[in-house]
Each structure stands twice: as structure tokens, then as C-alpha cells.
């Protein structure tokens, strides 16, 4: 090779000793085996990921998941405590006002004063429910952005028959009310004092316009605010508790949820719903019905359907006394068989209308977005809570779509 060619090669960037671009040996030294470095003017977006500096020994995965579970479970409990505190504060203020008015009108202990107090309490309850609906409605509106419920609405069957859904939920509410009433009749045989206290608590003493307010409070306002609080805010926080990869930036947009993970969260919110009623009898059946209402909400992705079921349950309570003489004519086993069959039939009708898995599928993430957080398996945390087969859980987390049916109630 003559000197002129050597000079030309050097100017063109070729190292005569190596026969390649000067940066080639740097690529080899850096551990990147392959072609030479592209010429100037060619740019490629290559993201080099380096581990974040550690300030100490990393926490064990099980520990971090457990802390995440505890944190969001406590957040759910905090919502329950705030709701109860709001009810107590409004009741204390309203009760004080009513007592003052009773003294001013006819004095305490008189028939007029007692009637005024009993009826005034209904107004206070309705006011507290309106305030709760306003506060927690705004809370739910904010929480719903990027929530599990929001994603669930996109997965649920868009073509489900509306009238069939409404009919099935009304049937379930009616049948469940009479079925529970039959169970309470058995409970009374073994715990008469407890049932006597419960009957006194549930006694309807309102008259006139106050009776109308009580009906509105029971049938409309209670389903409205309790569904927002329990199936809305608290179920969302329970879902976060069983989703160890949840983060404030991406929220639930890329999270997978297995059937088992949903049911753990559903039981958590139902427990809170039972505690919310503040008495052992009502709280016990409220827990069971809360599971059913949570399932209805999750299957449909629509809080309105859970409210409709709650409405049917509460409205049917006003039918128990008028229909009791006819129902009591039948033998008790027949009564349970009839209303149990109606309850099971209503649930089956609803399940056929919304035949979709209770799992949330994996969301495909673009390659460029992987480092921002890809979809992850939310079932992992349950290994710290329940013994499971991880392989089966992963299959259930991605088995979604019409015709694959979730866990029946």
C-alpha cells in the first residue's frame, strides 16, 4: 500500500492497522459485538438502562407487597371511618337542634315533643345522606379516573340486554329480601333478645310527610351514597391493595387482575359494608349482600346497576309486612325453596346477560413505553395472603372476553 492510499484511508476514517472504523474497537471493548458504528449524521434512539443507585439493602419482595396491601387496606378502612364520622357529626348537630326545638315547643317527655324528635331524626338522616353523597360523589369522580372500574367498563359486554338486566336485578332484590327475612325468623328462635333489639332499631315510627322522607332516605338516598362509598371508593382501594404494581402515575391502566384477586378485594369491601351498619344482625346479611352487589358492579362496570339492586333490596323491605300473612301460610321449607329458587334464578339470569370473565386482561404496551411500566401480574401479592398455584392464577388473569364466564356467586 503506497503512502498516498494510506493518507487517503486515514482521511476517510479507516485505520489501516485494523481495516475498520476507529470506533469499531471501542464497540468491541464496550462489549457490543456487531457492525461498526454508523457514519456521522445517522442517529438512533438507543436507551441504555442502568440500575438506580441503592441506598442500602433492597427490601424483600414479599415485604414490599405486604406493605402495599396493608397501606391500601388501611386507606379503605379510613374511607369507612370518615363516612361513619360524617354520619355521627351530622347526627349530633341535627339531634341537638331537634332537641332544642322539642323543648321550645312542648318540653321533653311529652307526646308532642317525642313525636317531633322521632320524626325530626328522619330529616337529619336524610340530610346526612345528601351530604355524604355530595362529598363522596366528588371523591369517586376523582378516583374513577384511571381506576379499575373504568377499565372494567371497557371489558364488560357492551351488548348486554338492558331490560333483562333490570328485571334480573329487581328479582334478585325482591327474593333476597324475603329469603333473609326467613333466615332472621330462625335466628330469632335462638337469639330472641338480639332480634328484639334489632326489631326496635328497625321500627318505623315516622308519620305523614316524615314517613315519605324516611322512604326516600331508605329506598333512594341509602343506595346512592352507600354504593358510591362501598362499591365505588372502597372497592377501588381494595383493588389497589391486591395489585402490588399499582402506582399513582399509571394507576390501573396497565394492570392485570385475576379472578381470585377481584374476589379478595370484593370480600374486603363487603366486610367494610357490613361494619358500616353498626349492628350484628344487619351487618351480617349486609356482608353477604355486599359481596353480591360488588360482583354486579364488577361484572357490568356500571355503578348504576349496583344502585338498582340496592334499591330493589331496600324497597322490598316495605313489602315484607303486607305479604307476611300470605307467605306464612306456607310451610317454612316451601318458603325457603320458593324464594331461594327465585334468588338463584335471578342471579343466573343476570350472569347469562353479563357472561364475561371477572379477570381484567393484560394491556399491550408499546416497546418504547416498556420502561415507563408494562402490564404486570397483580396476582403476585396474593401469594402472601392465600396459598395458590401461580400458573393457574396467571391463566385466569388473561382469560377474558364473552363466553368465558367468571366465578359464579
Image (cartoon, helix red, strand yellow):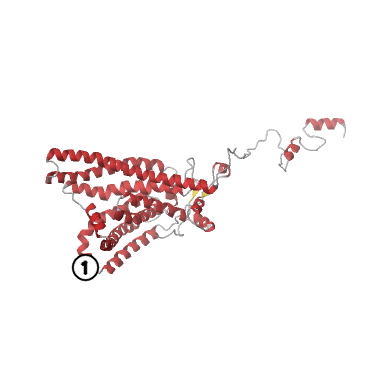
Total count of labels: 1
Give how far across and how far down residue 394 sits, in percent: 52, 55
Q: Is residue 305 left or right of residue 49?
A: left
- Residue 171 sits in quarter: bottom left
Closest to the observer: 144 or 13?
144
Residue at horizontal 54 percent and vertical 47 percent from the top? 61
Residue at horizontal 19 percent and vertical 43 percent from the top? 120
Question: Which image quadrant: the N terminus?
Answer: top right
User: Regarding mark 1 in the picture, which secondary structure is present there?
Assistant: loop
Q: Is residue 36 left or right of residue 133?
A: right
On screen, 409 above or below 144? Answer: below
Q: Report if residue 145 is visible in the image.
A: yes
- Write down the residue under mark 1: 329
Give how far across and how far down residue 353 sits, in percent: 39, 58
- Residue 323 sits in quarter: bottom left
Question: Which image quadrant: the C terminus?
Answer: bottom left
On screen, 12 above or below 375? Answer: above
Q: Report if residue 312 is visible in the image.
A: no
Closest to the observer: 381 or 344?
381
Closest to the observer: 132 or 107?
107
Q: Is residue 155 left or right of residue 346?
A: right
Local crowd at mark 1 within 10 Å, few (<14), some, or many (≥20)?
few
Closest to the observer: 12 or 334?
334
Amino acid at each position: 500500500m503506497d503512502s498516498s492510499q494510506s493518507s487517503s484511508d486515514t482521511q476517510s476514517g479507516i485505520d489501516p492497522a485494523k481495516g475498520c472504523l476507529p470506533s469499531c474497537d471501542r464497540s468491541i471493548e464496550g462489549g457490543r459485538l456487531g457492525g461498526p458504528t454508523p457514519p456521522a449524521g445517522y442517529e438512533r434512539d438507543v436507551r441504555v438502562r442502568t440500575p438506580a443507585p441503592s441506598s442500602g439493602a433492597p427490601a424483600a419482595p414479599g415485604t414490599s407487597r405486604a406493605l402495599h396491601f396493608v397501606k391500601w387496606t388501611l386507606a379503605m378502612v379510613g374511607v369507612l371511618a370518615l363516612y361513619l364520622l360524617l354520619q355521627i357529626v351530622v347526627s349530633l348537630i341535627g339531634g341537638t337542634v331537634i332537641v332544642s326545638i322539642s323543648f321550645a315547643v312542648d318540653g321533653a317527655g311529652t307526646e308532642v315533643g317525642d313525636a317531633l324528635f322521632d320524626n325530626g331524626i328522619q330529616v337529619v338522616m336524610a340530610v346526612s345522606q345528601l351530604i355524604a353523597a355530595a362529598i363522596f360523589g366528588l371523591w369517586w369522580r376523582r378516583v374513577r379516573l384511571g381506576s379499575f372500574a373504568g377499565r372494567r367498563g371497557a371489558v364488560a359486554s357492551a351488548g348486554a340486554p338492558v331490560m333483562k338486566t333490570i328485571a334480573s336485578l329487581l328479582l334478585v332484590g325482591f327474593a333476597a329480601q324475603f329469603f333473609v327475612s326467613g333466615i332472621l325468623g330462625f335466628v330469632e328462635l335462638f337469639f330472641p333478645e338480639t332480634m328484639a333489639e334489632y326489631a326496635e332499631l328497625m321500627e318505623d315510627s315516622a308519620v305523614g310527610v316524615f314517613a315519605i322522607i324516611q322512604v326516600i332516605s331508605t329506598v333512594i338516598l341509602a343506595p346512592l351514597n352507600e354504593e358510591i362509598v362501598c362499591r365505588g371508593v372502597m372497592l377501588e382501594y381494595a383493588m389497589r391493595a391486591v395489585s402490588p404494581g399499582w402506582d399513582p402515575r399509571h394507576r390501573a391502566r396497565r394492570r392485570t387482575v385475576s379472578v381470585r384477586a377481584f374476589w379478595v378485594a370484593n370480600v374486603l369491601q363487603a366486610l367494610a359494608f357490613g361494619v358500616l351498619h353498626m349492628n350484628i344482625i344487619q351487618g351480617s346479611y349486609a356482608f353477604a349482600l355486599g359481596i353480591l352487589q360488588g360482583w354486579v358492579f364488577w361484572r357490568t362496570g356500571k355503578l348504576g346497576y349496583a344502585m338498582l339492586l340496592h334499591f330493589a333490596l331496600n324497597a322490598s323491605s316495605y313489602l315484607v309486612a303486607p305479604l307476611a300473612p300470605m307467605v306464612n301460610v306456607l310451610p317454612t321449607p316451601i318458603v325457603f325453596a320458593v324464594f331461594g329458587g327465585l334468588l338463584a334464578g335471578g342471579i343466573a339470569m343476570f350472569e347469562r346477560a353479563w357472561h364475561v370473565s371477572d379477570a381484567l386482561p393484560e394491556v399491550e404496551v408499546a416497546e418504547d413505553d416498556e420502561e415507563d411500566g408494562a402490564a404486570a401480574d397483580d396476582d403476585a401479592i396474593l401469594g402472601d395472603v392465600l396459598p395458590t398455584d401461580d400458573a393457574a392464577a396467571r391463566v385466569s388473569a388473561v382469560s377474558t372476553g364473552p363466553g368465558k364466564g367468571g366465578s359464579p356467586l
